[in-house]
Image (tube, rainbow, N blue to C red):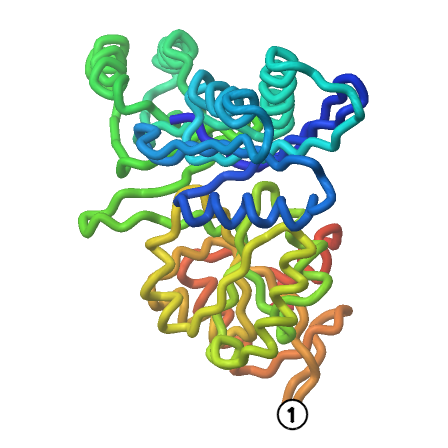
């Protein structure tokens, strides 16, 4: 299923009229409408803000608007591009600044389609598939045969581990699972150790394998949490701009904090910061985060922010799938001492919580700004 991982913009000029296409992933009609209204506010002085969106695994919902252009000359041609490209869960708004020359029906259709295609070309489009991680253990004599099979079937290698034996770890699309396992057994005369992982939703994102969701027995999805950060100030300029820029594809900041969830003033200030970065933002208590995070849409790429190590530990122990915990601003306080040569202040309770999180397999490190080196909090 083709979807937009990271939206983009594209602009064309036809007879002095500017056509600006803005593309964004959406998971519901409500999200699409909110995005369209956002673009109308942003480009309030434009002559037209035409739109089209497609939602659903089978493109069940599709809508378009000519926004004042002659009927069937803008929205419908834009929608035809999305349907032809077979892209799901996407909304496109094409803004037109009139240049003084009428383009005619055919000219408008071509311009809006070309602008839409340009916007898509400047976005990151991925093809999500269902598959399973496969681990194959073999001796060195069988390595060449397996490498040949993997290349022939165009499968994605994840890792190769060389010890007394060789362990190959790869991703196999669902439709190739049975046939590829049969090929492996035949090529190794049944001597390979074969181990299948859980079924997952995955895609290649700019030549890197990205796993979006794992299917559990209770039918929960694994949310796409790109990073979790501890910051006493939660969302401010550094978090809202520098870090969202450094995380490819991030489009939603989730603030998990009991105090912020009950404080409209804090929320309004942080919302303004998030808006400047082009991200949405949600505020939940810690308990609510644990309860709802697995309901996140696959199109939501999340930057999770908490206030302190205690909050992070509660989320991890509550089942929130955090794999990276970045420690940022932790301010001076009673009993807290500076850690290393950066201004991060911790007491023994903070370190105890961070060690407990690390013991769960989470990568825990200090990194104040995106370009800084990662530091061990325990040294």
Residue matched to label 1: 334
Residue at image location 68% in from the left, 82% down from the top: 337
Vertical placement of 233 versus 357: above or below? below
**Can you give x and y, in whole percent of width and height, for residue 118 in the image?**
64, 22
Q: Which quadrant holds residue 168?
A: top left
Towards the viewer: 93 or 262: 93
**Can you give x and y, in whole percent of width and height, for residue 126 in the image?**
48, 28
Q: Is residue 273 visible?
A: yes
Vertical placement of 286 versus 153: above or below? below
Towards the viewer: 349 or 323: 323
**Can you give x and y, in whole percent of width and height, for residue 30 in the image?**
42, 49
Residue at image location 63% in from the left, 59% down from the top: 274
Vertical placement of 261 versus 62: above or below? below
- Image quadrant holding the C terminus, namely bottom right
Is 92 situated left or right of 333 in this image? left
Q: Which residue is most to the bottom?
A: 334
| Label 1 Cα neighbours within 10 Å, binned few <14 / some 14-19 / many ≥20 | few
**Can you give x and y, in whole percent of width and height, for residue 266 in the image?**
60, 76
Judged from the image, the secondary structure of the residue bearing numbered disc 1 is: loop
Residue at image location 49% in from the left, 68% down from the top: 283
């Amino acid at each position: 299923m083709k979807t937009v991982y990271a939206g983009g913009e594209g602009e064309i000029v036809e007879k002095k009229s500017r056509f600006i296409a803005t593309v964004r992933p959406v998971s519901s009609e409500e999200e699409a409408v909110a995005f369209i209204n956002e673009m109308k506010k942003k480009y309030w002085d434009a002559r037209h803000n035409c739109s089209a969106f497609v939602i659903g695994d089978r493109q069940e919902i599709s809508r378009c608007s000519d926004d004042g252009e002659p009927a069937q000359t803008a929205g419908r041609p834009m929608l035809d591009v999305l349907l032809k490209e077979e892209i799901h869960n996407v909304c496109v708004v094409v803004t037109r600044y009139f240049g003084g020359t009428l383009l005619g029906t055919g000219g408008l259709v071509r311009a809006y389609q070309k602008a839409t295609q340009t916007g898509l070309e400047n976005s990151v489009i991925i093809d999500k598939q269902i598959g399973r991680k496969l681990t194959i253990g073999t001796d060195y004599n069988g390595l060449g045969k397996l490498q040949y099979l993997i290349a022939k079937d165009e499968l994605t290698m994840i890792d190769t581990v060389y010890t007394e034996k060789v362990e190959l770890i790869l991703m196999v699309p669902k439709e190739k699972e049975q046939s590829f396992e049969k090929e492996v057994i035949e090529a190794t005369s049944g001597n390979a150790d074969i181990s299948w992982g859980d079924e997952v939703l995955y895609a290649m994102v700019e030549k890197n394998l990205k796993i979006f969701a794992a299917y559990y027995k209770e039918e929960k999805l694994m949310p796409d949490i790109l990073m979790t950060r501890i910051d006493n100030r939660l969302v401010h300029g550094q978090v809202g701009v520098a870090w969202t820029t450094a995380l490819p594809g991030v489009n939603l900041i989730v603030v998990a904090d009991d105090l912020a969830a009950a404080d409209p003033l804090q929320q309004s200030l942080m919302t303004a910061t998030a808006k400047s970065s082009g991200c949405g933002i949600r505020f939940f208590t810690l308990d609510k985060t644990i309860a709802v995070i697995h309901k996140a849409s696959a199109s939501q790429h999340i930057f999770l922010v908490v206030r302190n190590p205690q909050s992070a530990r509660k989320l991890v122990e509550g089942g929130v799938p955090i794999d990276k915990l970045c420690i940022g601003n932790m301010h001076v306080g009673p009993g807290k001492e500076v850690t290393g040569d950066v201004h991060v202040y911790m007491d023994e309770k903070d370190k105890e919580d961070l060690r407990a999180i690390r013991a769960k397999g989470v990568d825990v490190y200090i990194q104040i700004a995106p370009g800084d080196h990662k530091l061990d909090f325990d040294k």
